[in-house]
Amino acid sequence: MLRFVARRLVSLLVSLAVASCVIFVFVEVVPGDPAAYMLGLNAQEDTLNALREQLGLNGTLLERYLNWVGGMLRGDFGTSYTYRTPVSEMIGERMWISLPLAIYALTLSTLIAFPAGIWAASQRGSLVDVLVMGFTQLGVAIPNFWFAMLMVLLFAINLRWFSAGGFAGWEAGFGPALKSLTLPAIALALPQASILARVMRSSLLDTLGEDYIRTARAKGLSRRQALWRHALRNALIPVLTIIGLQFSFLMAGAIIIENVFYLPGLGRLVFQSIAARDLIVVESVVMLLVFAVIVVNFLVDVAYALVDPRLRVRA
Amino acid sequence: MTFMKFATASALAMMVAGAAAAKSDITLAMQLEPPHLDPTSAAAGAIDSVLYSNVFEGLTRFASDGSIIPGLAQSWEISDDGLTYTFKLAEGVSFHDGTSMDAEDVKFSLDRARAEDSANAQKALFGSIAEVEAVDASTVKITLSAPNGSLLFNLAWGDAVIVAPESIENIKQAPVGTGAFKFANWVQGDNITLERNPDYWGTPAKLDKVTFKFISDPTAAFAAVMAEDVDVFAGYPAPENVPQFEADARFQVIVGNTEGETILSTNNKMPPFDNVKVRAALAHAIDRQAIVDGAMFGLGTPIGTHFAPHHPDYVDLTAESAYDPEKAKALLAEAGFGDGFTTTLKLPPPSYARRGGEIIAAQLREVGIQTEITNLEWAQWLEEVFKGKDYGLTIVSHTEPMDIGIYARPDYYFQYDDAEFQAMNTALEAEADVAKRSALLDKMQRKIAGDYVNGYLFQLAIPTIAKAGVRGLWENAPTQANDMTGVYWAE
């Protein structure tokens, strides 16, 4: 087991090193000079040079790469070119919006998807099943930004229940902050809930056809009892996998929704930084996301190996 | 009797409540967020849009009509040879951190802007200054290396505001100026708050608090205004909605002039555009009003040269490049391009360029010029077009005020190299006499119009949507600014 973990750990480090090279090279080869972007059309060549010097942009590619990686190893993500604040601070601030939003959306989607999926599966072929399948089909098909706009039109412009966007800030209190995340969370949750409900339903139907369910029924359990005690637990495995995937999607993929509701989240930070050629921010955020994904994969690998000894040998 | 007392008391109470409820704060939205808060080291107009005249002040300043009025300098004397300017500073001015503003701060600010390692985006503004001298606490003497007729104008720019050496270290995050508002808070990505400066040396601001909110998406902008989340949207990004706001009694629409000459920039060194007949053909192939109507929904004024139509020295030369496709075809044939040619049209992100580009491409096709359209991000545009000069045509709005001088720079991206124009510009820079300057500007405008350096399209207009009760907003934008010092709510 130890050898397995050690081997996985080495591969994790190699992946991180390769990822850092790829990210750096890809971001740096994109044409565009951050100094020119900042100083605009009237800037003189000597001013541009002075600014490049201040930003540390005049070194060779290798020097800058080593600076960046060395800094990250010491926990220093560098300083944003345009904002002139430490990147770690910026990521920290934005995280306080993106993370709660992702959790909020995931909670909502689970709360919708579980009952809907279970209900549809338990009454297969009934009107409920048809309705759930119909609505989830619609939920998957509707683009979330369009749905978001419709909600803004109804709840913000006509009914005035919510503001049209922006973030109240956590210092304004939990209630107002949560309220400003509500419409975005619903918009993000809708397609996720639809997918999740469909997975829940089909997974549950699969397990309901298993031999052990028939045995349970034969032993005298009602259909409902068999479903809740035996089928549901086993049906959860694929559902949990999907939830895990959705979470990383919600963390990194909320860019469009953040734009519709002008929320200052992580996605919008990356978006703005790319336009402004704030390369150091782009590199660091992307690296952080890669790091998170690689570490989660590593933990999952280890967990699988713990549960299933056969995997240790194969890996 | 008792009833009367009660009624009087409640009426009084209501009056008091009414007075207390009069709004003293405002939320103003704009599209772009400042990258940082130092107006003296970046070109980003968003920095001035928040801070100019609100937080930072210069020796002189722009009034809303574009004229130059005294700022921190209350008066000035110009020596007969035009080489020495002596400024008398306002008395009792202090920075928001409590330190006093005196001649040493002015010297520091100007020396910093023109220093060797300066990162000032408009360093050229200070090019003629040879020495800045603090004569006494309230007197500053600026000596020039050559006469400069636009020094007072140059000093009014946001890039020339007065900063303090004590607070320069943190200016990018916590700007400390002398203005009627002081910086309070910045929630990055969302808003910046300014508060009234109770110790302001001049006329105090009427509002207690101003919140600048940043909403980049046009659809979100529409929703924010309709839901009344914001009181003002300066530079509203979707002109197609303007008629809807005009029809709604809750709002007022202010369409103001800007200093943005929107032009079809032409690479003057790239064949076939090195031939003046081809450039003239371009000018006659363009239907300006159709572009204003189609791309800007009617907002904007057609121009015939690189000069703002609301400026007193403007010469209307639109007739020289009147829409005449037949003439354009004839000119192309004369130049040897009877069968037309193909060129590139590289478009930066603003909608005036993207929408305008499609229309111009169609108009050019009518006379036989085929364009390959490429959409570029700003950073790519700066690299490829502005610096690399790898383009045939592009569309961009030049938003700096009074920037006709760019035509005297042969290495500027449209590569117009004309000795006669350069001589005129040198003469203009040295000329302080108003009438002679006007005459020179007249000649310069005619010169670049006659040489068809670029396709002059229209003067960019900015629509501002505000709640009906807001008063005192600038109508025009002689510089990028939202001067909030005179803004208040009507009853």
Image (cartoon, coloured by chain):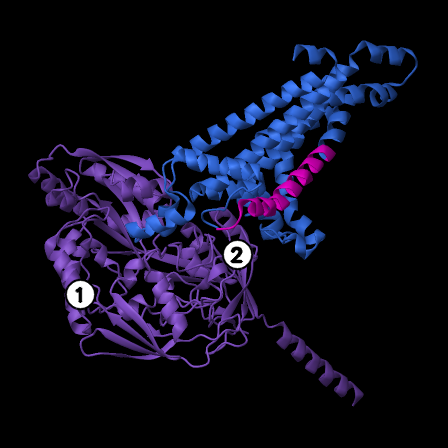
Chain colours: A blue, B purple
Q: Residue furthest left?
A: B334
Instruction: Answer yes or no: is residue B260 visible.
Output: yes
Query: Is residue A135 found left or right of B376 in the rendered image?
Result: right
Residue at (60% x, 51% y) in the render: A167
Query: Is residue A115 found left or right of A226 in the rendered image?
Result: left
- Residue B329 position, x and y percent, is 13, 40
From the image, tell me which residue sits under label 2. B213
Q: Quadrant of residue B26?
A: bottom right
- Residue A20 position, x and y percent, is 51, 30
Q: Chain of mark 1?
A: B
- Residue B173 position, x and y percent, is 51, 57
Asked whether A93 falls inside the magenta stretch, the response is yes
Relative to B121, is A275 above or below?
above
Quarter of the figure that contains the N terminus of chain B:
bottom right
Quarter of the figure that contains the C terminus of chain B:
bottom right
Magenta part, dominant SS: helix
Mark 1 neighbour class, 10 Å CA radius: few under 14, some 14 to 19, many 20 or more: many
Q: Over which residues does the magenta segment extend?
A: A84-111
Point out which mark residue B90 bears.
none
From the image, tell me which residue sits under label 1. B428
Q: Residue furthest bottom?
A: B1
> Distance of mark 1 from mark 2, alpha carbons?
41 Å
Instruction: Answer yes or no: is residue B358 visible.
Output: no
Q: Secondary structure at mark 1?
A: helix
Query: Viewer-proximal residue, B226 or B391?
Result: B391
Query: Viewer-proximal residue, B34 or A128?
Result: B34
Q: Secondary structure at mark 2?
A: strand
Residue at (30% x, 48% y) in the render: B396
- Residue B92 position, x and y percent, is 46, 80
Q: Earlier in the sequence, mark 1 or mark 2?
A: 2
